């Protein structure tokens, strides 16, 4: 009986922690982009939650343990997890916006490929940029920063405690607008090259109206677009870092 009483509070805390962490991972491509069974993902979330619950005093649940109180606390953890995951999801959406812009400009928007990260049919560069976002996320060690930020969130949003949603809305809206700006800035040099190609093709079509500009322009835009993208991505490390840093800056604003 004594062992069960000492184990009960820790189990409740670990369950609530796993709900918050699980919502963050479920709504973002952090784990879904890596092929693994659903059971393994659940075990990863439970393992992280158990480790945090055992190591951090801020993850202890101090509320009532009746069924109604636990259900309310679980709903609060779901809402906080959704709020935190929104910032990460917007960071990956920035790469999708950049890829969508290039697909429209180059002409790849006419074709669709299945993207395992989002489980949707996406144009070529949109899916490629999503996979690039996952690769950069782990290459920049952002997953460790994510775990530290999740642990830090339990200090400002205790388990089962209400949180001021009205104060979070302006922060989220600023983050959404910033992601669109960063998404366009990520591929702005490539779009500029494509606009110059369009200008040259329009001048050529005006002087040689008998030529089929659609047949001639498509391969030219593909070659120029992919070539400019390959050159630009080698120097776009600062922009990529700014995209993921904006996520944690957004979280810092939420924690104030």
Image (tube, helix red, strand yellow):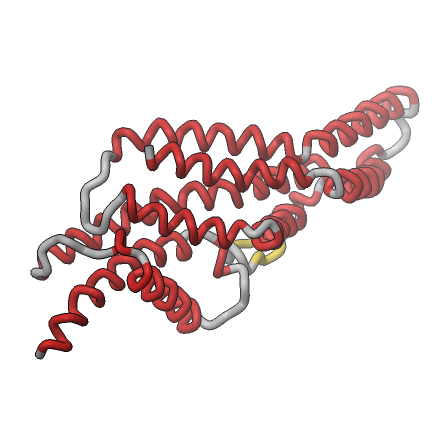
- Which residue is depicted at the point 65% across and 51% down? 128
- Indicate the position of residue 25 as horizontal and vertical percent values: 41, 56
Residue 122 seen in render: no
- Indicate the position of residue 197 as horizontal and vertical percent values: 82, 29
Residue 60 picture quarter: bottom left
**Quadrant location of the C terminus in the rendered image:** top left
In the visual, does 108 lie left or right of 3? right
Residue 225 picture quarter: top right
In the visual, does 79 lie left or right of 112? left
Q: Please give the count of numbered marks on the rendered protein.
A: 0
Which is more toward the observer, 161 or 212?
161
- Indicate the position of residue 100 as horizontal and vertical percent values: 61, 40
In the visual, does 40 lie left or right of 201? left
Residue 20, placed above or below residue 251:
below
**Quadrant location of the N terminus in the rendered image:** bottom left
- Which residue is depicted at the point 14% across and 77% down? 3
Residue 242 seen in render: yes
Residue 95, placed above or below residue 117:
above
Residue 40, placed above or below residue 96:
below
- Which residue is depicted at the point 48% across and 49% down? 145
- Which residue is depicted at the point 50% across and 54% down? 143
Which is more toward the observer, 242 or 232?
242
- Indicate the position of residue 17 as horizontal and vertical percent values: 29, 58
Which is more toward the observer, 150 or 108?
150
Which is more toward the observer, 164 or 126?
164
């Amino acid at each position: 009986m004594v062992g069960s009483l000492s184990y009960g509070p820790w189990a409740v805390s670990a369950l609530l922690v796993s709900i918050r962490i699980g919502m963050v991972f479920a709504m973002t491509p952090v784990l879904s982009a890596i092929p693994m069974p659903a059971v393994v993902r659940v075990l990863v979330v439970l393992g992280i939650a158990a480790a945090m619950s055992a190591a951090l005093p801020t993850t202890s649940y101090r509320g009532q343990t009746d069924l109604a109180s636990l259900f309310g606390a679980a709903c609060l953890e779901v809402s906080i997890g959704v709020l935190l995951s929104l910032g990460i999801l917007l960071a990956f959406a920035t790469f999708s916006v950049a890829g969508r812009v290039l697909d429209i400009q180059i002409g790849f928007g006419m074709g669709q490929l299945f993207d395992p990260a989002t489980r949707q049919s996406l144009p070529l560069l949109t899916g490629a940029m999503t996979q690039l976002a996952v690769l950069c996320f782990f290459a920049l060690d952002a997953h460790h920063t994510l775990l530290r930020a999740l642990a830090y969130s339990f200090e400002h949003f205790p388990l089962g405690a209400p949180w001021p949603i009205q104060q979070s809305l302006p922060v989220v809206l600023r983050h959404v607008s910033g992601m669109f700006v960063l998404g366009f800035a990520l591929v702005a040099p490539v779009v500029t090259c494509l606009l110059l190609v369009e200008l040259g093709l329009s001048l050529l079509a005006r002087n040689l109206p008998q030529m089929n500009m659609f047949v001639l322009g498509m391969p030219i835009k593909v070659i120029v677009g992919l070539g400019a993208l390959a050159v630009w991505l080698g120097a776009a490390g600062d922009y990529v870092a700014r995209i993921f840093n904006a996520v944690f800056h957004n979280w810092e604003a939420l924690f104030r």
